[in-house]
Amino acid sequence: MTERVTALLQSIGHHPSAESGQLTLPELGALIVVAGVEHGFEVELEVPCCPQHRNHKVDCLWRARNSDGSRGAVIVAWEFDGRDAGPGHLLGGGARRGNLKKLGDTGAALKIQALYSVRNGVLKDRRSAVRGALESAGIDVYLDSELISDKLEGIVNRALTRR
């Protein structure tokens, strides 16, 4: 990891009611944005998942940078949610699009559902209800504490090989 990412990692995830490494949404978002920029990706926030669904947005994309200045391919698509997010939000169903479909529509090489832990206290962990469905669709699911420990570096390395 770069010095900037390392410094950020040391300064976030310290909340009185939470375990070390449990993050808020702003901390998680900052970590993902800084890691992407620091490793040479073009980072975009709140991007429509596909032209047909302009109102359905993905939280963050890491794109390759093309030498001619044109938009590069989407390498990593990220969705950020509280670890208490329910199956309807994450998987969709009925008229609800869900993160599973939004991430799939991006065409990204890597699709990540990142879950933060802290919002007015520590959130209940409900990922077991959706992890299997997301992972069978090619979407990796990580808790904030996993990203802080070593998983983010692994994602960065995988993304760098796909540029």
Image: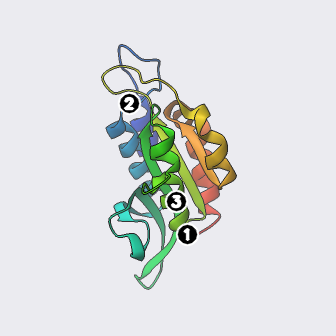
Rendered residue at 65%/55% (across/down): 137
Nearer mark to the viewer, of 2 and 1: 1
- Which of marks 3 and 2 precedes in the sequence? 2
Q: Is residue 54 left or right of residue 84?
A: left
Q: Position of residue 55 (x, y in %)?
A: 32, 65
How many dots with numbers? Answer: 3
Q: Is residue 137 left or right of residue 97?
A: right
Q: Secondary structure at mark 1?
A: loop
Q: Position of residue 86 (x, y in %)?
A: 47, 37
Q: Which residue is mark 3?
A: 101
Q: Disc 2 to disc 1, how far (Cα)?
A: 31 Å
Q: Which residue is mark 2?
A: 12
- Which of marks 3 and 1 precedes in the sequence? 3
Q: Secondary structure at mark 3?
A: helix
In this view, 62 is above or below 52: above
Disc 1 residue type (three-letter): Gly
Q: Nearer the viewer, residue 34 or 110?
A: 110
Q: Disc 1 to disc 3, how far (Cα)?
A: 11 Å
Q: Position of residue 88 (x, y in %)?
A: 47, 44
On residue 107, the disc is 1
- Which of marks 1 and 2 precedes in the sequence? 2
Q: Disc 2 to disc 3, how far (Cα)?
A: 31 Å
Circles 1 and 3, Cβ within 8 Å, touching? The answer is: no
In this view, 156 is above or below 145: below
